[in-house]
Image (cartoon, grey):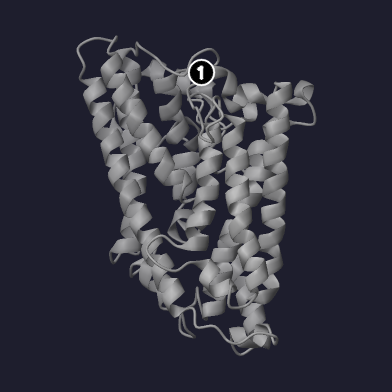
Amino acid sequence: MQKNKFNVMGSVVVGAMLALSGCGDSSDNNDNTASVDASGIVTDLGTDIRTAYTTLASDADTLYEATVALENSQTDDNTTAIEAVQDAWKTARVSWESGEGFIFGPVESLGIDPAVDSWPLNTSDLAYWTGVGIASNEAAAQLGNDVRGFHAIEYLIFGDGSSTNTRTSIPLAERQYLRAVTHAFKEQIALLADTWTTDGDPETAGNQEAYYVTFTEYGSDNEAYPSQYSVIEELLEGVIGIVDEVGNGKIADPFGESSATSDVSKVESQYSWNSTTDFYNNIRSVQNIWNGVSGSGLYDYFMQREKTSADAVTSQIDTALAAIAAISDNDGDGTIDADVQAKAFRNQITSGAGRQLIQSAIDELATLQSQLESLRGTI
């Protein structure tokens, strides 16, 4: 989500440089613990991030192809084609939200994040542009971020979410617009994947080598990451940032101080009733960075610095995930029931029982954020 995005890169690099000016390496930053070699951890996490973006690019391609098929359907009423786009959107959404723990590097510096995930959506302008009849991929790519990306696609295929989270009929002009903005979406995601996997054109990708190399080959001649300390701090600040954004922004902003002050207009992914799933996958991104997916993760670093605190974070991530899932768990099995209207986050913010569950999730996220922040001094 672009709204109030935590700017990790600038603060991390500045912080790292200041720290380095007073310390020779990470071992000097904590006199009570032995030096930790993070090279393998950084390589593993770099591989995880690169793989995640490759998967996301594939999901974006699938979503685009589904919109092409929908556009080419012979009638406005084509439930099967619409459902295929909805399913593809949800799959891509999982890949994107599960990567919110590492919103740094090209996704931030090239403006890819706001281009694909700005919120709130400008529904008035969206209605205007669909009325005008934007069918050109090139024209769609020039539109403002608030009328394209994930949430424009979401609105067009799910509807406004007030009483249902699906549509059975989409006029041709809207299907054409949908295809065009999804093309712009997939191009942005392809650029993101390319910046992590291939040597990029400096004029388009913003770097002369794959960002994976920049990220994993830290050293004194690496402007972005002059030491392993700066990489670990980048990763730690990234997960702190998304925990903060979920608990204090995405959930707390629409929640309000009471049901009377709650504001559904601030609920991201409200049209699809996918909000709770978004929150859950945001914290899964923290879990993926913490535990690692293909190998080691941040836990493997911090357990050598402060094992008790590291173990507490591991446990608290699970607790926070369970608390989020409970918000939209209709049958008590510990999983999110995304298509149950009463359990949609947009409705739970005005429900007495729902608000208790939401407050519990906010509290657990605050605890997790505090625990992660306490690790700053152990890097």
Quadrant of the snapshot with the C terminus: bottom right
| Residue at image location 75% in from the left, 31% down from the top | 256
- 166 displayed left or right of 22: left
The answer to which image quadrant residue 150 occupies is: top left
From this viewpoint, is residue 204 visible? no
- The kind of residue tagged 1 is Asp
| Residue at image location 54% in from the left, 25% down from the top | 331
- 8 displayed left or right of 61: right
Quadrant of the snapshot with the N terminus: top right
Residue 106: give x, y in percent of width and height: 43, 59
Q: In the displayed structure, would residue 79 be above or below residue 241?
A: above
Q: Around disc 1, counting alpha carbons within 10 Å, would you say few (fewer than 14), some (14 to 19), or many (20 or more)?
A: some
Secondary structure found at label 1: loop
* Nearer to me, 217 or 366: 366
Residue 274: give x, y in percent of width and height: 50, 30
- Work out which residue is located at the far bottom of the displayed protein and give it: 24
Q: In the displayed structure, would residue 141 be above or below residue 215?
A: above
Q: In the displayed structure, would residue 256 be above or below residue 242?
A: above
- 201 displayed left or right of 284: left
Q: Which residue is mark 1?
A: 160
> Total label count?
1
Residue 168: give x, y in percent of width and height: 35, 12
